[in-house]
């Protein structure tokens, strides 16, 4: 086992190991002893970087939010429409699809990201472009400017949209709809996005 005295990247290695464990086993599988074993250091070395397991999980949650944002940005970038209204509508729908896509592809990380751990930088989740909440607000503001979201419906619309896609994700990830065939699930998602759009107009 290595000591991290000369191991400047240990913190990043610990986070990477914890993220992989979360991906494979969910939050319950992130055990400090296994994390440090994978990083090749003694268990006590982790406490030089994290106060406890929850602090490590909070950093994994932070990473998970970043990965969710990256998925949303990638899907938003695929929108090719140039008409402002069509573009705003397509980008909003892209964020919803991306959210569900990430939740179903990365259930362990998704569970950690929304597991109630105290995030390492709470301010980041109201201002940064890496924040999925800020991305959602951005596309809703684009819709407001383009006329697809009404001024009366815009206040609080991000909460309605987030709650809808989050609930949909959980129902299909580990809830009573988890065995629904993918084609039916995708059709149900499009119907839900239709209804959200109609409610915002």
Image (cartoon, helix red, strand yellow):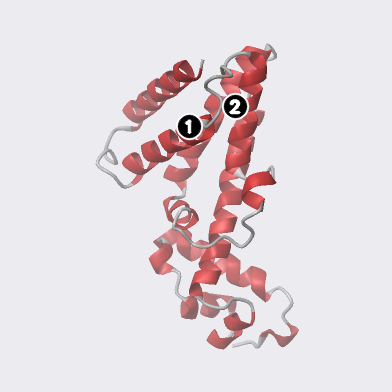
Looking at the rendered structure, the secondary structure element under dot 2 is helix
Quarter residue 164 falls in = top left
> With respect to residue 56, does 193 lie above or below?
above
Q: Quadrant of residue 51?
A: bottom right
Residue with the mark numbered 1: 161
Say whether marks 1 and 2 touch (CB < 8 Å): yes
Q: Nearer the viewer, residue 130 or 104?
A: 130
* Left or right of 41 on screen, residue 181: left
Circle 2 crowding by C-alpha within 10 Å: few under 14, some 14–19, many from 20: many
Q: How many labels were placed on the picture?
A: 2
* Residue 130 seen anywhere in this rendered image of the structure: no
Q: CA distance from mark 1 to mark 2?
A: 10 Å
Compare residues 43 and 155 and report the one nearer the observer. Answer: 155
Residue 137 located left or right of residue 97: right
Counting from the top left corner in percent of width and height, residue 24 is at 43, 60
Secondary structure under badge 1? helix
Residue found at x 60% / y 85%: 45
Name the residue located 31 percent from the left edge and 47 percent from the top edge.
174
Label placed on residue 140: 2
Query: Where residue 139 sits in the image (x, y, percent)?
Result: 62, 28
């Amino acid at each position: 086992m290595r000591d991290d005295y000369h191991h400047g990247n240990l913190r990043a290695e610990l986070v990477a190991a914890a993220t992989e464990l979360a991906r494979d086993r969910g939050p319950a599988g992130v055990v400090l002893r296994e994390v440090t074993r994978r990083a090749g250091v003694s268990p006590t070395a982790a406490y030089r970087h994290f106060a406890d397991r929850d602090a490590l999980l909070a950093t994994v949650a932070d990473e998970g939010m970043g990965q969710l944002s990256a998925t949303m940005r990638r899907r938003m970038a695929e929108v090719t429409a140039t008409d402002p209204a069509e573009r705003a509508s397509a980008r909003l729908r892209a964020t919803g699809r991306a959210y569900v896509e990430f939740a179903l592809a990365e259930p362990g990380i998704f569970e950690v990201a929304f597991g109630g751990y105290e995030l390492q930088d709470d301010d980041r989740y109201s201002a940064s472009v890496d924040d999925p909440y800020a991305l959602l607000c951005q596309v809703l503001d684009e819709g407001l400017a383009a006329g697809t979201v009404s001024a009366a419906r815009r206040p609080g619309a991000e909460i309605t949209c987030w709650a809808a896609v989050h609930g949909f994700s959980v129902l299909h990830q580990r809830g009573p709809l988890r065995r629904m065939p993918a084609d039916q699930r995708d059709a149900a998602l499009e119907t839900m996005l239709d209804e959200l759009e109609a409610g915002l107009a």
